[in-house]
Amino acid sequence: MKKFLTILTVATLLIWGATFLYFFSTGRIDKYLDPTFRIYALISGIGMLILGIFNLINHNRAVGVCTHDHAHGDTCDHDHHHHGNSHEHDHDHKHSECNHDHDECDHDHSHDHDHEGEHSHSHDHDMTPSGVLFCVLVLLVPVLAGTAMSKDRFSTEYLMKWGKIERQMMQMRIARAKPKQQNDTLGSVDPSANPYTSDAVAGDTPGAADTPPDPDNPNAETPGNEGADNSWETFTLEDLKQMVPQSDAGDFLLDVPQIFYTAGDKELMAVMEDIPVETTAQLMEETLNNPDNTRLKAFRLFIECCAADARPLSIPIDFGKAPPEYTEMGWYKIFGKLHYSNEDGEILPILKVDKVVETIEPTDGLIF
Amino acid sequence: MTPETLTPLDDFFYLFLSIVLEGAPFILLGTIISGFIDAYLPPGLIDKWLPKNKPLAILCSGLLGAVFPVCECAVVPVIRRLIRKGLPVSCAITYMLSAPIINPIVIVSTMKAFSSSVGQFSLRQNEAMESYGPLFMTSSRLLIAFIVTVSVGLIVLKCRPKSILKPSIIPRSQGGTDDEHGGGGATISGSDKLVLAMRTAMRDFLETAMYFTIGVAITAVFKAYVTEDLILLFNQNEVTGIGLMMVLAFVLSLCSTSDAFIAANFPVPQSAKLAFLVFGPMMDVKLVFMYLSVFRSKFVISIAIGLAIAIGVLSYLWIRL
């Protein structure tokens, strides 16, 4: 029994190690971890195999042979006279005062005696056989089932759910930042900063995060701006050109998360209103901001460390008519003009689509 | 056109595997260190390194993570072995709770996360969005963590080890039993010590990984099945936000090296972010199960409640100072 359990635990470790190496060698790990963590997974997979093989080779080797009586354990070379389940109790008595027969117990005692006798027991050599089996099951079943059944991506429902949360958080964040941003930036927009829009900046462009622009008086200051300390340098189109590459056609090559995070920043929105944009993203149904059913959602997954912290950041893309047929979650290059809209009190970056072209998943499909 | 329809179960497996692949390397590292501690570190040696004055030793333990940085996954098997090697329980718990926060890696990641909460996507620094700078948030995180963990250590100092530790962990010097085969055992040869170290490492890895796996599964279930309306609760008021952010930290079980990036983008008061950043690395779902491999369940429950109250109150007050 002892030998079987030892081999079982070694086999468990080897299976884990092999699983880690499998994920790395097949490239599946790219869908799960940031590149830095992939290396750790590789090293640990090798480490688990080394540890397992070493222990397998040496499993019969007796080291540190105990001279004292163990309470429990399965890999010990002597009979513990205990078996089965476990419970814990504090005896706080001399061993001689025990009124039960330890040899007859059908469970693991793990006694906490205040020892006055010379024997000692109940240390962490090993788990009971049932404990080992439970441990092996817990370690192997979900990992092997996951390896076999995981599709290495999220469901549409998951992305919609967490995408909605991201949008909600962004709007809350904008709302929370309003007062400070007003003080810092309002009034610092250079009306000539954006030649792409005929209205220049002040017209139908993004207003302050809290106050929609007044169509009749677009240059009106927003409450809270009086005496503002414009400590930021004015952001201009030239700044944008230096930061963001452009295609041969002059389109700004922006990622969805970059566009997503411009919402609420008055200066950025002013400069970026109506600029031509090319972006690559996955498409899915727009369920949040789609009053006329003319929009789809373009999204990218951003991962800090592992897929569990993945954040689906998305923007609506507007076709001005019913969207064309598309592959849900498919990859597309999207060309259009960037627009900021205030809808139901929310500042939304929206890409007004000129055309979409189906494409293959880019090598950086997941953004780390 | 629609692709193959996936279910929440698929999400569960994807989430589960990603956390296992991310966290297991650190558990392996911790358990290998634990194995070598068992085999090569003579019992009582650490006790000799620490100041004789117990409160001073606890203070030093609170800063030990800066010298021996380990994340929360790796620290549990390490302290488990250190306790059996004679490290006072109060110092071990202080180190266990503080090391995942008070270490250079976490300091850098917190600074980075709050320098620009939208990270690489920011077309310019969005500091206008933040009321507090990265230095404030990072130093606040460290300071509150230090105060809380040292306080816990001082409280534990008053407790008997047997009321805190599982019987199998209590060293003989503290009223437990002695299964120390390594360092102190003069009868073991060099090669035997290596075998012992590797054997201990494997055993510790399997046990710790089992608790870790259970915790990760619960986390994955939460993420796969939680509803989006939950987020609206976070902004009801500051106190609610603090409480819910700690609940979120508990359930999400994020690594302390990456949790700041999540916190920085949450639309909650800074005090709630702070509570999230301090509480999460000390207590989360997977850690509860890992702690249960070392501590009695009553102690784990007590410390979870105590930490939540202390961190919540301190975070609330700190922002107002």
Image: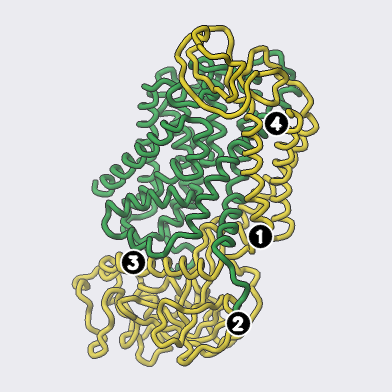
Chain colours: A yellow, B green
Residue appearing at x 35%, y 27% in the figure: B155
**In this rendering, position of residue B229 left or right of residue A138:** left
Q: Residues within 10 Å of mark 1 (few under 14, many from 20)?
A: some
**In this rendering, position of residue B22 left or right of residue A237:** right
Residue appearing at x 42%, y 31% in the figure: B299
User: Helix, strand or loop at disc 4?
Assistant: helix
Labels 4 and 2 share a subunit: yes
Q: Chain of mark 3?
A: A
- Asked if A86 appears above or below B244 in the picture, the reply is above
Q: How many marks?
A: 4
Residue appearing at x 66%, y 54% in the figure: A145
Front position in the image: A308 or B137: A308
Please name the amino acid that badge 3 sits on.
Met
Find out whether the residues at labels 4 and 2 contact each other: C-beta distance under 8 Å. no
Q: Which residue is mark 4?
A: B198
User: Helix, strand or loop at disc 1?
Assistant: helix
Find out whether the residues at labels 4 and 1 contact each other: C-beta distance under 8 Å. no
Find out whether the residues at labels 3 and 2 contact each other: C-beta distance under 8 Å. no
Disc 3 and disc 1: Cα gap in Å?
Answer: 37 Å
